[in-house]
Image (cartoon, helix red, strand yellow):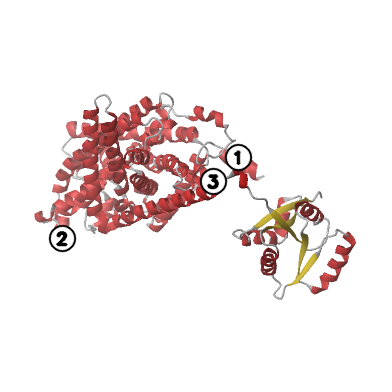
Amino acid sequence: MFAFLRRLLFGAPIETKRQIHERLPKFLALPVFASDAVSSVAYGPQEILIPLMVVGSITWGISLPIAAAIAILIAIVAFSYRQTIYAYPHGGGSYIVSRENLGLYAGLTAAASILTDYVLTVAVSVSAGVDAFVSAYPHYAQWRVELCVLAVGVVAFANLRGLRESGALFAGPTYAFIISLYTLVIFGFLKLVFGPHPEPIIKNYDQCLQQIGHGMPHALTLMLVLRSFSSGCSALTGIEAIADGVPAFKPPESKNAATTMGIMATILATLVLSISYLAYAFKALPGAGLVEHGLTNVPNYEHFKNQTLVSMIAENVFGRSWFYFVIQWATAAILILAANTAFQDFPRLSSILARDRCAPRQLANIGDRLVYSNGIALLSFFAIALLVLFRGHTTALIPLYAVGVFISFTLSQAGMYRRLRRLKGPKWRLHSAISLIGSVITGCVALIIAVTKFAIGAWIVILIIPSVVFLFHKIRQHYLELGDQLRITDFKAVPTIKTTAIVLTAGIHQGVLPALLYARTLSHDCRALYIEIDPNETPLVRERWEKLNLDMPLVILESQYRSVIGPVLDYLEEAKKERPGHVVTVVLPEFVPKKWWHKALHNQSALMLKIALLFKKDIVVTNVRYYLEK
């Protein structure tokens, strides 16, 4: 029944030889690997504006050069990762590039940074998607956390079904978002060119600021500008995903991945600039900023407080028409499904770390749908925990965002610089200079983000990253020590093993006989052990045992407190002392009912005993099953 339900939910298992056919063409790879970066257009430009809102109407003018700087940064990082794609056709994520060129611990730092960012990617994308939904349907705001958890579950379920199916599922919403945003941009510019001069969406903004004591000219500081820039840099998260997932592309993998990277960077940069300019032209400000700065005196505050920047611009251009709701639905869908990028790369990177003995081995296992199921489940757990902890509020999660990704950007590009300098291939001076410039710039951005957001949450990520690196180090140390102990150095000195077999029996019946007969094949020192819970049953047990005539002693132990596990553990320790150097084999008779639900009608003493013996030295536990036919 469980196998049937599993197949119904997740589909039939896929053969390993079909793995090459599960790879993605560029048309499907773009929504799978670029949805995170592209979707950040929905919140990146508004995050630029939120810190600047305390300085009044000059906010819009300052936001434009900041958006332009972010667009230039997108181009630099994208070009650098294109070089990585060609240099590492089997997947050149930040971890691999840093480990091979800067050393193991630089690689582990990059891995810890990017894994932390993937968890935040899921949390921020989903919460921003729910924000877009709530903008159109404010009465659902009270269910924000529940909607976030449901969204993570849907994306995780889609990924558990397999790579091609998730690509086909996410292609529609991703392309719908891109088309609807470009339509919004085109009609917005047409309205600016041919329509009447637009009225500001937020009216009397300077006066509203002055009423609450803000809006003084000297309020604009370098720190405020840097904080705005660092918040807007959240638009770059996910840009490295294509370089991580090169093996998932159809051949030629590097060429297809590099082309997809160029398309993604173009879409991202043009939309960030366009949305920022439309916000400037229409004097739009996000509702999250009004709430954060306490601007409840703004006209129509109740209408604006749940609205995103894209929602405000779309309403101004199209009104509350059907196309406005198309934009909101497309935005909500891609933001929620943008978590798919993390669901592709978090398990993939975790599996690489596991193969390098820096993460639990289970993360390297490929499920029957040719996906890393354990990594998907782990990512879902962490993302849901974050969303519940921060109540699904994007603004609360953003300060944690982007620190890790820019650390990984810096290490990856520094690694590419060293690689290009070492190999000295064609045009190596130009390419290494680009990587060096990119590394310096992204390093500066990482520092800016850490400083400007430290007090409002970035300290959490700055603390988590070294902790995760330390965890990787301890896991690797464990596996190395394990390997040293398991390695056979002298094949001539392989020891022999002697065993004492003890059959734990709750009574003398047909289900016990196979276990007794099996135990006799293991050792000449074989005995049965009965724990006396009810003294009235002991004479019957003795009588039946004598009738069996098995030439095997029966040991009966009285349990003063009617416990089975305690007396068994004490007796096993005594048995080990009796025969030093012997391994004690505990044989547990177990009968298997015909129907699965009958199992719940019987006690689970054998299971509890196996758990109790799990870490006991020189004790082996084996089950001998007796199958009931009726």
Query: Gap in Å between the C-alphas at discs 3 and 1?
Result: 43 Å
Q: Residue at x 17, y 31 (%)?
A: 193
Q: Position of residue 582 (x, y in %)?
A: 68, 58
Q: In the rendered image, which residue does mark 2 sit on?
A: 211
Frontmost residue, 591 versus 501: 501
Instruction: Please tell me the numbered disc located at residue 8.
Output: 1
Helix, strand or loop for disc 1: helix
Q: Quadrant of the N terminus?
A: top right
Give percent across and percent down for residue 146. 45, 53
Quadrant hosting residue 98: top left
Alpha carbons under labels 2 and 3: distance apart: 75 Å
> Disc 3, disc 1: CB below 8 Å?
no
Which residue type does callout 2 highlight? Answer: Gln
Left or right side of 315 for 592: right
State the mark number for residue 487. 3
Q: Nearer the viewer, residue 239 or 438?
A: 438
The amino acid type of the residue labelled 3 equals Arg
Disc 3 packing (10 Å; few <14; some 14–19; many ≥20): few
Front-most of residues 496 and 408: 496
How crowded pointer 2 is (Cα within 10 Å; few <14, some 14-19, many 20+) is rated as few
Mark in the foreground, 3 or 1: 3
